[in-house]
Image (cartoon, rainbow, N blue to C red):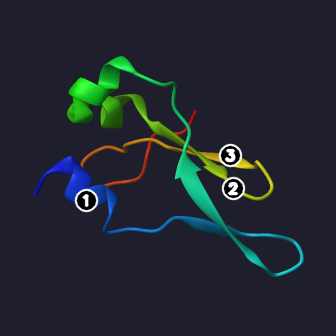
Amino acid sequence: MDQASMDHMLRLQHRHRDGSWGDMVEDRPHHAAADHDPERRWTLGRIFRCTSCEEAVTLVPGDEGGAAPER
């Protein structure tokens, strides 16, 4: 399965204090170098930002089969 297919399989949202849900979209620079190398993009982590409140989260890969190491 290619990266474009995987990106469309999931919808990322977060819950606001008022109980509503906000859609999260990937926040990355236009024409990022990772556009041509999706595997590299995942190793660097991905930033997603809420479309309504601008709150951001970062998804970073963890160790295979486990949680991400503590920072």
Q: Residue 56: which disc?
A: 3
Q: Does residue 56 sit above or below 35 in this rendering?
A: below
Query: Which one is earlier in the sequence, the residue at label 1 or at label 3?
Result: 1
Q: Residue 51: which disc?
A: 2
The residue furthest front is 30
Q: Does residue 35 sit above or below 70 in this rendering?
A: above
Q: Is mark 3 on a helix, strand or loop?
A: strand
Classify mark 3: residues with Cα within 10 Å, few (<14), some (14-19) or many (20+): some
Q: Does residue 26 sit above or below 16 in this rendering?
A: above
Q: Residue at x 33, y 18 (%)?
A: 33
Q: Residue 63: which disc?
A: none
Query: Which one is earlier in the sequence, the residue at label 1 or at label 2?
Result: 1
The reply, left or right, for residue 15 in relation to residue 35 is right
Res. 13 image quadrant: bottom right
Residue at which label 1 appears: 6
Q: Does residue 10 sit above or below 54 in this rendering?
A: below
In three-dimensional space, the C-alpha distance between marks 1 and 2, rounded to whole angstroms, equals 21 Å
Q: Quadrant of the C terminus?
A: top right
